[in-house]
Image (tube, coloured by chain):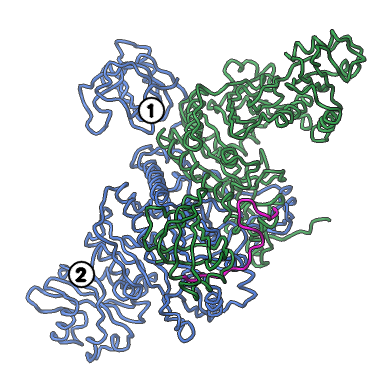
Chain colours: A green, B blue
Amino acid sequence: MYRTHTCGELRISDVEKIVTLSGWVQRSRKMGGMTFVDVRDRYGITQLVFNQDMNTDLCDKANKLGREWVIQATGTVLARSNKNTNLPTGEIELMVDELNIINAAETPPFTIEDETDGGDDIRMKYRYLDLRRGSVRRNLELRHKITMAVRQYLDKQNFIEVETPILIGSTPEGARDFVVPSRMNPGEFYALPQSPQLFKQLLMVAGFDRYFQIAKCFRDEDLRADRQPEFTQIDCEMSFVEQEDVLLNFEGMAKYLFKEIKNIDFEGDFVRMTWADAMKNYGSDKPDLRFGMTFVELKDLTAGGDFIVFDSADYVAAICATGCASYTRKQLDELTDFVKRPQIGAKGLVYVRCEADGSFKSSVDKFYTQDHLKTWAEACNAKPGDLILILCGDEMKTQKALCELRLEMGSRLGLRDKNVFAPLWVIDFPMFEWDEESQRYFAMHHPFTSPKPEDIPLLESNPGAVRANAYDMVINGVELGGGSIRIFDSKLQSKAFDIMGFTRERAESQFGFLMNAFKFGAPPHGGLAFGLDRFVSMLAGLDSIRDCMAFPKNNSGRDVMCDAPSRIDNAQLEELYLELKQPNK
Amino acid sequence: MYRTHTCGELRISDVEKIVTLSGWVQRSRKMGGMTFVDVRDRYGITQLVFNQDMNTDLCDKANKLGREWVIQATGTVLARSNKNTNLPTGEIELMVDELNIINAAETPPFTIEDETDGGDDIRMKYRYLDLRRGSVRRNLELRHKITMAVRQYLDKQNFIEVETPILIGSTPEGARDFVVPSRMNPGEFYALPQSPQLFKQLLMVAGFDRYFQIAKCFRDEDLRADRQPEFTQIDCEMSFVEQEDVLLNFEGMAKYLFKEIKNIDFEGDFVRMTWADAMKNYGSDKPDLRFGMTFVELKDLTAGGDFIVFDSADYVAAICATGCASYTRKQLDELTDFVKRPQIGAKGLVYVRCEADGSFKSSVDKFYTQDHLKTWAEACNAKPGDLILILCGDEMKTQKALCELRLEMGSRLGLRDKNVFAPLWVIDFPMFEWDEESQRYFAMHHPFTSPKPEDIPLLESNPGAVRANAYDMVINGVELGGGSIRIFDSKLQSKAFDIMGFTRERAESQFGFLMNAFKFGAPPHGGLAFGLDRFVSMLAGLDSIRDCMAFPKNNSGRDVMCDAPSRIDNAQLEELYLELKQPNK
């Protein structure tokens, strides 16, 4: 037997017990004739004590232990004279009688501490050492706790978890599929699922009524920051429901998770905001509601100042940063540089300082009178001491830029506390997006999303104005999940395909088996999917999804620890009837 | 709102309530002026009633409903005069006031009943209809219940579920990997995991202590009956454990599952049987212990009868079939044909009938005296009325054939009741298997399996005799799971690689990153993996794993429902720098 207790378990009530612990050497130190060794496992740290006078050989052995050696120690639990109140085991120590070196260890390439000296690359290469750090391990423990809670909640609501296949057929619509050559079917390929969408809809046709799955999904996309080629969804679908049923059920799940995991109670219902309002007031379909600073449109109020920049802009809008009138020239220049960054793309930034004496100081002073500026301040509800920041230009682009500026100001003003959570539902998304390049409509959510019944007449006359029964759950500016009520009527589906420019043949080849299935009695259904990685990283207070995954890949899709992907044998290529082509460099 | 209740919910206490149900038309029938429609959902079936006299139009509408149409009905719950005691809802019916046809349905290609008229192929093509059948759906509900219970048990034992990647590096040892070309790393491939083995061992090095995962695994093998290219394991690993700790923990899990799912209590510990005993007594490393009929070796007792077949055989062994002395010539011929089938491969079958009068009648009468035959009967503990069946030849092959004959006799005698469960652990597997073709030893379990400490000296002198710390859980002749205590000492690992003929370079290239990880402080560890599909199918009483999977593939690895795998675009091949070769027909 390697241990009687874990390293996180012993308390003052265990004093005088003879116990055996196993674990890793966290650190050791010599003080006078005593040697102290902290031994660590997943459950905690316990201090071992060796006395030079009482047992010289044993103490010498202890003095030779290195960091991260695996040891086993047997001895008597003693009360510590010098208690460590930071550790649950801090009231006791183990006076060791027997020390067994299970495995020596090379010196790790970075320190195994919550705050490490290891950079990102080396941490990923030695991920198995990185995972020893409490700050990383706790994220994965949290992930486990969250998935357990999700399953508990959904099981109680009569959802059943069904595993859908990973080797499926390729669906060209949407992001790029990873493909898997089939040896038994030469020249043919499986695809890895971007989501279990089609299968969960088939399960509704099959009468499963309430389905969920914590499902691996795959997208072969160029990886921006915080994207992974494989990621995990909490995927759900329900039959005989309307949008309200879905929202209530999953708002319940989110509340349950926040209560179970963070002991946070949300009072009342989540805010519901239409997509149109979210864009108008926050310039984003995932607004961060931890703070206000909503957009104020100033186009009308800026007319007549002879300021050509505003006059020629489609859209002029402001945010009001409370108490920032004291911003220096340098700070204002920083903000200007911020909005002019290519990712944000504004041409410039106009400010109005609301001075303590009620006067205004602005970068467009020469075009506008004090009275003029006053009307802006009133529109923005700005008080003396506040700073008004104005962007202008094309409506969509300016909204996006102003959204970034708002978030930046929120961060600067400390309004984005990681321990505050502001959830909302964004609803009434547009059904279609117009794509300039291909001159056609695309489904904003996915091609089976249903229109709002009252907008069905618009399908013919003005497809761009049709709102969908689609919804996203957003918390703190992060889209945690989203979904829709699906079309289950084949005539309506045909019309939607027509609008998206699908020929009957193309619709048939891509979605034929689902459309066939619908002929045999499809129930009304809808659902949603949460990004588990994002949900965990939000609850863990992380900035990236990487550290809530055990073995993430880097931005080139590589696992640097096990060096994947890699070359394969020619014999294996031949079995698959494949040949490699040289990329043109 | 589509429904106030499900179709499985209404009871006599609901009489007089006005309710709305939604579901599928199971069947309808006209009797006099009444029309009865059974409406079905996942939760049950409720009878709807329409009265021709009271509401002619509504009744006419009901008369037009077809099988599997999706409907919504509102009405009043009535007590049934003619109760159906087979249905939980059989005491009530719904007198309908309002009927809404949600979706009509084409006639399904087979009947949606527990016993269907649909063959395997059509059921798979229309799997979404097949899944509507209660007998199929219940298997998936059971699967959900089992995975919930597994997670509950392991969570309580401090295991944490960690998701390991699906896109990993290829490991040439073992079965064939499915590979995934990487667009971002031209010419390189990911592999899909055959199991999370390396990752779970890395998690032990990372100090995770107790890991589990209900994990998708992939093997590109030629599919025999009851193999699937993707399957699911309950994958587990523990640190600071010996074999005993692992066996006790997972015996506990199995007992918990049988109690939760089948309300079966197992008294005492599971039988433990060495691999050597299992082979000797049952000719199998997965013996079915629901019945005895153990092998009796007769080589010594058959000497001196001048029967050349026995005399020239390495091995002669019998089983005793209780009460089968009355088997006719025809029945004995059937058994002879059975053992001579190429899959079984025996050359012939010798029988001894133990007659009621104490005499013996045998196919080898002319070679052996009654006294001779009596010694065999005594060795077999055969009583008058019993039948002794004897095979001979090469030891391994004959054991295998006799094992099949034993199972056949068990089936014929009704000793293999699906509701009886006989679990055991098979332990002390050989560490290595000799492969004649490549003239080298292979790891019987996997290359990291540790030898039994007392057999370590044999590693040099007689590797074939070394027993491993490896174990299988077997129930009713099915291997449900297996695992081992791993080697964590790098010197011992090198020696094992040497025996298996791995060069240092080959070991390095295949397992380098795990061996490197072990240098940084590897704890003693071990674990096992259960085949979830097999576990579910055993608890569901199924003969195949297919019907406990939602969307299985056929024997060519095809999903006939969504027609995967399939051709992909040339554009996509080009992006992957791949070219197809023509197979030589």
How busy is the neighbourhood of tag 2: few (under 14 within 10 Å), some, or many (20 plus)?
Answer: many
> Where is residue B189 shown, x and y percent of the image?
67, 58
Q: Is residue A454 above or below residue A168?
A: above
Q: Main secondary structure of the magenta part?
A: loop
Is residue B195 visible in the rendered image? The answer is no
> Where is residue A20 shown, x and y percent of the image?
41, 64
Total labels drawn: 2
As measured in the structure, the alpha-carbon distance from the residue carrying label 2 to the one carrying label 1 is 52 Å
Using the image, tell me which numbered label, if any, was put on residue B321: 2
Q: Is residue B255 above or below residue B468?
A: above
> Where is residue A381 shown, x and y percent of the image?
72, 13
**Residue A106 is a magenta residue:** yes
Q: Is residue A9 left or right of residue A401?
A: left
Kind of element beneath mark 2: strand
User: Which residue: 41% across, 76% down?
Assistant: B467
Using the image, tell me which numbered label, if any, was put on residue B90: none
Is residue B381 visible in the rendered image? The answer is yes
Q: Is residue A8 above or below residue A291?
A: below
How busy is the neighbourhood of tag 1: few (under 14 within 10 Å), some, or many (20 plus)?
Answer: many
Q: Are marks 2 and 1 on the same chain?
A: yes
Quadrant of image for the C terminus of chain B: bottom right
Q: Is residue B451 left or right of residue B194?
A: left
Quadrant of image for the N terminus of chain B: top left
Disc 1: host chain: B
Mark 2 and 1 residues: CB-CB less than 8 Å, in contact?
no
**Residue A399 is a magenta residue:** no
Q: For the residue marked with disc 1, what is the amino acid? A: Val
User: Which residue: 80% across, 16% down?
Assistant: A354
Using the image, tell me which numbered label, if any, was put on residue B25: 1
Kind of element beneath mark 1: strand
Query: Which residue in the rendered view is the most extreme toward the left?
Result: B357
Q: For the residue marked with disc 2, what is the amino acid? A: Ala
